[in-house]
Image: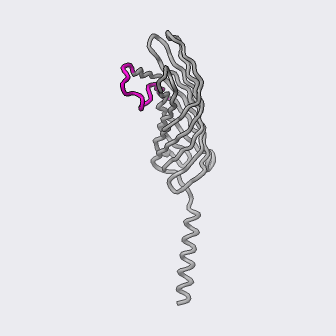
Amino acid sequence: MKQLLIIALLCSTTQIFAQDNARFERKGFVFGLGVGGGIIHIQDHNTETSFEKTAGAISLPNLKIGFMLSEKTALLATLPGTIYQYEGRDRSFEAFIPSIQHWFSDSWWVNGGAGLAMDFPAFYDMKGLENRDFNFGYAFAASSGIELVQSRNYTLDLQAKVQYGKTYLENDGHRNGTIFTLGVGFNWY
């Protein structure tokens, strides 16, 4: 009986240590959600009324959807966005950006890509607007982050992002937006 108790104790102790040393693995489908704040600089060109503003901004919800190509590289569709004010109304300067994310170490990653810029009223401020003024163009974004927590199928990271976009307005005008944000991200693998 004493030997059976020692074997059971040894097996349970080994199992506990094996679970603590389980290696984190990135594979399969990726879904990420981020929130943060930063600075946005918006400027209109060639329009009837000029507009230029630099202000603090809220950035949410920044989404990432895609899949791992290898353990260190992912192909993602990223959706960064930031809210700003124009003529007393909230607007959203966002983008849909296909991107590549690569981990240069176990916890440090870099992401970059180019895609579609979108400038439109904030989703919560669209009610009752006759002229919704949806504008589209092109965008570039680059970001980097450090994963602070890694579990079997999720990570929690700190991230910094730079985004530039140009949308086309009526009367041959365009609106440029440059955004820098810092935030927290939660990712599932």
Q: Residue 23: where, in percent of width, then height?
A: 56, 59
The color scheme shown is: one colour
Q: Residue at x 53, y 54 (%)?
A: 25
Image quadrant in which you'd find residue 140: top right
Q: Residue 45: where, in percent of width, then height?
A: 54, 14
Q: Residue at x 56, y 38 (%)?
A: 36
User: Residue farthest to the bottom?
Assistant: 1
Q: Residue 102: where, in percent of width, then height?
A: 57, 42
Q: Residue at x 58, y 64 (%)?
A: 20
Q: Residue at x 42, y 22 (%)?
A: 134
Nearer to me, 82 or 6 = 82
Give the mark count. Answer: 0
Q: Residue 7: where, in percent of width, then height?
A: 55, 82
Q: Is-magenta flag for residue 182?
A: no
In this rendering, the answer to whether 184 lies above or below 1 is above
Image quadrant in which you'd find residue 5: bottom right
Nearer to me, 43 or 72 = 43
Range covered by the magenta-colored residues? 115-131
Nearer to me, 42 or 101 = 42
Q: Is-magenta flag for residue 127?
A: yes
Image quadrant in which you'd find residue 18: bottom right
In this rendering, the answer to whether 151 lies above or below 173 is below
